[in-house]
Structure formats: C-alpha cells, structure tokens
Image: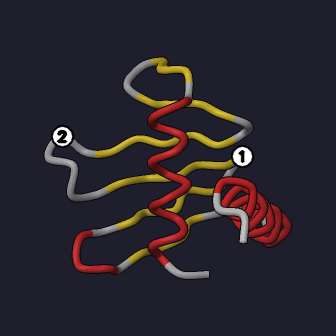
C-alpha cells in the first residue's frame, strides 16, 4: 500500500479521533506528529509506523501478526473512506 494511503488514514484519525495527551485515537489506531509536523506516526497495538518527510517510512513492531493486522486495518479504512 502506498504512503499516501497511510497519510490519508492518518489525517482521518487526527480529524475524527479523540485527543488524549497529544495523540488522536480512533478505531484502534493512534496518530500523532512531532512538533514541526514533518514526521507523523501511526500506532496500532505494539506497532508504530513512522511517516517521514520526503516519502520515507519505517515500522517498529514486536509481532509479525500485529504488522499484518495493521496493514489489513489500514486497507479496510482506506476503502471505507474512498469507495470506488
């Protein structure tokens, strides 16, 4: 899945999520960004996806299953928000 789809879901969580301690929470996802907004983060259980300036990204997670669930959740949310 493309970085732009992840950013689309990130923006949805920030716009519609509940804010607690400078993080936004919605449907099992957590979204936050650094002070200048150039680095964004999407969290799910033990996974954190770092979305960096210039289109780079990185994942940190403990369990491969969490990574797979995260990708399925992102794909599902994107399709729900962008029907064909």
> Disc 1 designates what residue?
45
Mark 1: give few (<14), some (14-19) or many (20+) Cα within 10 Å: some
Scheme by which the image is coloured: secondary structure
Mark 2: give few (<14), some (14-19) or many (20+) Cα within 10 Å: few
> Disc 2 designates what residue?
35
- Secondary structure state at the residue bearing disc 2: loop
Q: Is residue 24 left or right of residue 61?
A: left
Examine the image and state in which quarter residue 77 appears: bottom right
Q: Disc 2 vs disc 1: which is toward the camera?
A: 2
Q: In this view, does 83 lie above or below 54?
A: above
Please tell me which residue is depicted at 54% across the width and 30% down the height of the picture: 16
Please tell me which residue is depicted at 72% across the width and 63% down the height of the picture: 83
Distance between mark 2 and mark 1 Cα atoms: 23 Å
Please tell me which residue is depicted at 82% across the width and 62% down the height of the picture: 69
Please tell me which residue is depicted at 21% across the width and 58% down the height of the picture: 38
Q: Which residue lies furthest to the left in this view?
A: 36
């Amino acid at each position: 899945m493309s970085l732009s789809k992840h950013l689309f879901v990130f923006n949805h969580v920030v716009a519609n999520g509940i804010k607690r301690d400078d993080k936004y929470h919605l449907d099992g996802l957590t979204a936050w960004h650094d002070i200048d907004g150039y680095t964004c983060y999407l969290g799910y259980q033990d996974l954190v996806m770092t979305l960096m300036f210039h289109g780079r990204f990185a994942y940190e997670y403990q369990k491969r299953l969490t990574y797979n669930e995260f990708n399925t959740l992102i794909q599902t949310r994107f399709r729900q928000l962008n029907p064909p």
